[in-house]
Amino acid sequence: MEAQLAKDVRPFNFITSMRIIRDAILVSEGVNTINVGRAVLIHTKPRSRLDVGTWGTMGMVWDIALLWQWLHLVGLWFLFRGLWIWF
């Protein structure tokens, strides 16, 4: 993946755009996007990806992304599907 990110491709594709923004909190919505993201996107920080919106819950990504960012900023513990996770 690092070799593909190092290439200077014109016009940009979705792989070269990841070279510009690194270490972002990624929220994926939709099963196809989630599958591509798991296979392609590089994560250098723990707890920086949240996969949402599968099986009939499409359209919730913005609310969840804002909640995720707030929890990450204030450093709260959050109960998520029965597991305690520190953000």
Image (tube, helix red, strand yellow):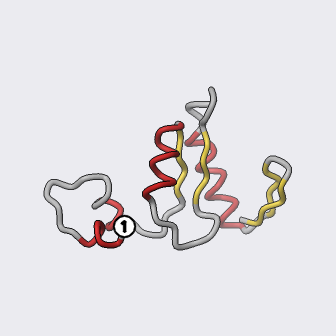
Foreground residue among 8 and 74: 8
Q: Residue furthest left?
A: 10
Residue 24 % position (x, y): 49, 64
The crowding category of the residue bearing disc 1, from other C-alpha atoms within 10 Å (few below 14, some 14 to 19, many at least 20), is few
- For mark 1, what is the residue? 1
Q: Which residue lies furthest to the top in this view?
A: 56
Foreground residue among 30 and 61: 30
Residue 8 % position (x, y): 18, 67
Q: Where is residue 85, by image quadrant?
A: bottom right
Foreground residue among 34 and 48: 34
Image quadrant occupied by the N terminus: bottom left
Side of 72 where 78 appears, left or right? right
> What's the residue at 63%, 30% (across, down)?
55
Residue 86 % position (x, y): 76, 66
Q: In this view, does 39 lie above or below 61?
A: below
Residue 5 % position (x, y): 30, 68
